[in-house]
Amino acid sequence: MNMNEKEGGVCEGGLNVTLTIRLLMHGKEVGSIIGKKGETVKKMREESGARINISDGSSPERIVTITGPSEVIFKAFAMIAEKFEEDILASMINSTVTSRPPVTLRLVFPASQCGSLIGKGGSKIKEIRESTGAQVQVAGDLLPDSTERAVTISGTPHAITQCVKHICTVMLESPPKGATIPYRPKPAAGGSHTVLSQPHTASAFAIPGQFAIPPQDIISHQSSVWRPPSQPVLMS
């Protein structure tokens, strides 16, 4: 996620900016976004005004990049979340499942920003969860061969969109530190694992705010997390 392209600085809510946000999706999810003959993604591009690009199909995991002014980004997110909700409802027809699962999206952005997203003692991510109703989880592990982590958000389409607004504001206020090595999904070969299909192998420190961070990170970066807002927050 590149949050450095600012236009006129951060206005009320930090929304007067141009953003580039990356999502990690399964091939099936990407297929839903693309639609028959590309009709769905074309409609999303036209109606939201966002640039929506999808990485090539040689990997079971794909990166979906959404770029545009903030209000355009949020509209695109709302449309994607609503499409996934439609898919969930369709899958429940003639199903014995009685409770509707939430919509889930996975954002990808620099690990150096995770400290600001979590906040001191988990205060910021707890605030986001409580104010939006969405569940938020920060992966304890870096994505393979990158300096990025996955942030999973789930809930109703409205809750997800509100959550993305909060997350973007936090990220704009605390830009990435140093160079970012982006995660690039690799083609599956010989049964090699994929990020989305495997559970995290490293233990994670979880708080009832639905986020996780490795115990060693909590210890080694305690001084960084507790610094005043004027000081940079450093996370590995």
Image (spheres, rainbow, N blue to C red):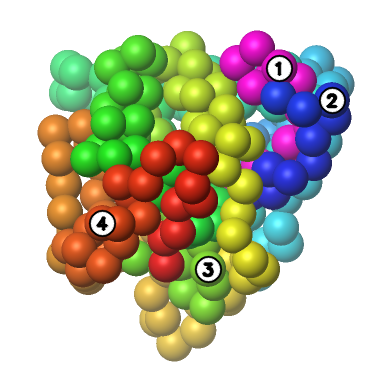
**For the C terminus, which image quadrant?**
bottom left
Q: Are marks 1 and 4 in contact (CB under 8 Å)?
A: no
- Say left or right for 212 vs 154: left
Separation of marks 2 and 4 at Cα, in angstroms: 33 Å
In the picture of the structure, the residue carrying the numbered disc 3 is 147
Task: Please name the residue that numbered disc 2 is placed on.
Answer: 8
- In the image, residue 17 lies in the stretch drawn in magenta: yes
Q: Gap between marks 3 and 4, in whole Å?
A: 20 Å
Q: Is residue 215 visible?
A: yes
Rendered image: mark on residue 11: 1
Residue tagged 4: 222
Give neighbour class at mark 3: few <14, some 14-19, many 20+ (Cα, 10 Å): some
Q: Position of residue 47 (x, y in %)?
A: 80, 16
Is residue 160 depicted above or below 145 in this figure? Answer: above
Q: Does the magenta stretch include residue 41?
A: no
Amino acid on which the number 2 mark rests in the picture = Gly
**Which amino acid type is marked by label 1?**
Cys
Residue 33 falls in image quadrant: top right
Q: Position of residue 171 (x, y in %)?
A: 56, 39
Q: Which of marks 1 and 4 is nearer the N terminus?
A: 1
- Cα distance between the residues tagged 2 and 1: 8 Å
Q: Residue furthest bottom?
A: 190
Q: Which is more N-terminal, label 4 or label 3? A: 3
Query: Mark 1 Cα within 10 Å, few/some/many (few <14, many 20+)?
Result: few
Residue 220 in the image: x percent, y percent?
26, 67
Image-based side of 58 in relation to 27, left or right? right
The amino acid marked with disc number 3 is Thr
**Residue 89 position in % (x across, y down):** 39, 18
At horizontal 26% and vertical 56% (from top left) the residue drawn is 222
In this view, the residue in front, 175 or 77, is 175
Q: What stretch is highlighted in magenta?
A: 11-26
**Quick check: 214 left or right of 16?**
left
